[in-house]
Amino acid sequence: MNRRDYLIRKLLLSLVTVLIVVGINFLLFRVLPGDPVRAVIGRNVRISFETQAALRAQFGLDKPVFPDQFLDTLGQWGRGNLGVSWSQRRPVSEILLSKLGNTIVLIGLGQILSIVFGVILGLLAGWKRKTVIDIGALTFSLIAWAIPTFWLGIILLAAGSTWLGLPTGGIVSPDNAGKPLYEVLPDVAHHLILPTLTLTILYLGEYMLIMRSSILEVLSEDYILTAKAKGLSYWQVLWRHALKNAMLPIVTLIALNLGFTVSGAIYVETVFSYDGLGKLFQTALIKQDYPLLQGAFLLLAVSVIIANMLADILYTYLDPRVKTI
Amino acid sequence: MFKRNWLLSLLLVLTVVLTACGGPTTQAPSAETPSAGQEGEAPPPAETAKAVVHFGWLGKPDTLNPAYAFLTESYVIFDLVYTPVTTESPTGEYVGGVAKSWTPSEDGLTWTITLKEGIKWHTGEDFKASDMVWAINAIMENPDGWAALSSYVAGFKEVKALDDKTIEITLEQPIGNMEYRLSFLYAVYPKDFEQFKTPEDLQNFNNFDIVGTGPFKINSFDKDKGILVLDANKDYFDGSPKIDQVIFQTFDNADAMVQALKVGDIDMTYEVPQSAFETIKGFEDVNAVSIPGRYFTEMVINSVPADHDPAPTGNPALADPQVRLALTTAINKKDLVEIVMQGLAITGDTIVPPTLGGGFWHSPNIKDVEFSIDQANKILDEAGYMLGSDGVRTKDDLRLEFRLQFPSDNPIYPRMADLMTGWFKEAGIKTTPEAVDPDSLTVAMTPAGDYDLVLWGWGPDPDPDFILSVMTTDQFVDGGWSDSGYSNPEYDNLYLQQQITVDKTERQKIIWQMQEMVYNDRPYVVLFYENLLQSYRSDRFKGFIESPLGIESVISMLQVEPIK
């Protein structure tokens, strides 16, 4: 099978996956106990039974789940409309877009920094195995990987705001609200420091550990011995022969993590009151806001699938074996 | 050769690592410097020229459209931007909002409302009686659209303006809590709302450019960023605010908000987590306020009548009044307050907390049973429940073994359940604590009646009507508020009667009687009333009014002034 056929097959499989996800998402939220109307209006609010019924009808909840509600939803999506959020009363696509950028900036920065540092640390540790560098890097990575997100975030927030005067939350200082983005860019960057640092530390350990074990495995291969025997320097051995092969597991991991980037980092976003998708998912679930939930999970599913496809494509370049399967 | 190369490579890698490591550290100051510069330049003029109160909270308004606003945060903003007809005072009486006076006719069927002088919209136009009439009529004509407010006009027959300053409301039957109802009828700006014809269009309107007559006017609301800015309305008819601006900032995390208070990013917050209260008390220049509040926590005892459809699955032993009494006697409310609530609550007895109406509605006639395990044992002995070899009492087919469930979203319940299970055990009652997702618990309780004992809480309205309605038979249906399944025709009658009793003392008598019924029948065992925990920085602003209305009330925000 050549590369083109391989990609077409992957693409078709991805489409099927999206369709299955859409179906499951639709059913999943409707299986949850509770009444969306009650979830939207909350406890302690008096609303007459008639008005509750009117809202239920407005949301289409008075119709049978299948086929009516399902077909309505599919029809709406077919017209490229994700619907209107019940709790926020705004178009779902508008809500998702407003958060998507923020999340991509935050998680993207965190991912890039952790990949760079994680890979370098992993390489260094694997290469200098059983030295102080290795043990130090290994200990640090294990700790970083094991730390609870929430705890690390709070500690960094307390320390950063007390000693460095960094903001305690949000995307921009309240006093700068409403100003155009280019004017408040430094302020936005200021607000990004602590959440990015938290994310970097959290992801770094995983990348480092995978990179280290991967490079160790590669370094024990015969062809490395051959390369060394040819008289190549360690740096050349590492760069030309070891790194490319050792990167394979990392590519998988990056693809997986990037896919989930869109789901946001619920904990980090919550600790730093950062307006992103993770937090949105959580509130949509609490409010049982079906249109918002369905839209959000569609976005999540599609991005995970795209990320995996990209990884598959990348594999065909990194690993010649793949396209011949 | 080998060695040199090794060193060279190490050097290279080190350089890469160091420059990379340098990334964030050089980035941090570079990002910080411009913004620090900005803080150094922008705020001084802002701070010297403007008195800005930074207000931190854990939520944000769902919308600024009162037709479809369900979150407390929205109502905090409505109270500051709009003016209702009447408004609650810190002592629990009602005072005028836009109204100067409001008087019922002899038969209670007609209310005449006279408006205050000199009221202007934020746009500068005069506010007229016809505007207020339009606002009330809008709700009456489109109750499904005005979902959040329609219950306040239920039973209104006609509303009309007699002249520019006088309004007349005709009712279908007298309304006992008219003053309270009027406190939710806001002077909304007709031009903002008249274009919406269907309920859905009206509800989709976010009204972020809210126009009112209140002491503050909207500057901006960025819902995504969670930043809402209000400017003082210097032309407010009841005296201008002493501050220039209030900025509301949303925190998704209580610990972060407490930290913001500590470092001075915010000046006040109206919701301090109980666990942080002691810590905040220790902060420099910060006042921590603990005021008796409206929220209560109760133990629900399954009271669904056995012949109810669907049939309840609660333990039938709970129908025995002596079992209920024994359960109540075996609960040490003082310990719950001291241990679980860290003293930030007062022990409770009735479903109408003593803070409602400044204490006017809370029945003084209830003598709460004293905690005594011995007494609980004695009650059960006398009722014929004998201790089995497994330490659980039984009588014929009845076995005193109950589920003790609670919603999983509040950390106080598991601690309460543990303590209570210990006390019950000493009385020969076995309870099994279980955390349940709140939605599942609601479904299990109403109207299925599939539970024994449940720990939960309520935050009643300022008027007792709502919390009293929770105990009526009509509410034990899908979408209703009753979870105990309590059904008492006499109580239901009294409920209807208090609704149409305009004389306050008469209504008080009925409401006391209703509380006593609930207390004695025990569908709820009210455990404690939670305090309202708030906090503000004392080094920048003064004048906050600490009352059950909270430091964020209109009356308080009108008094707040900068120090120097």
Image: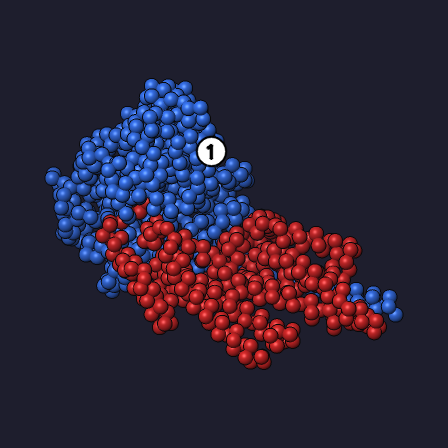
Chain colours: A red, B blue
Picture coordinates of residue B343, whole percent (x, y): 46, 31
Q: Is residue B236 left or right of residue B270?
A: left
Q: Residue at x 14, y 50 (%)?
A: B157
Identified by mark 1, the residue type is Asp
Residue to which mark 1 is pinned:
B418
Q: Is residue B85 left or right of residue B7?
A: left
Q: Is residue A57 left or right of residue A175?
A: left
Q: Chain of mark 1?
A: B
Q: Residue at x 47, y 68 (%)?
A: A17
Q: Label 1 neighbourhood size at 10 Å, few (<14), some (14-19), many (20+)?
A: some
Q: Residue at x 77, y 71 (%)?
A: A223
Residue B89 seen in this snapshot:
no
Quarter where residue B347 is shown: top left
Quarter where residue A252 is shown: bottom right
Q: Residue at x 30, y 28 (%)?
A: B320
Q: Nearer the viewer, residue A151 or B109?
A: A151
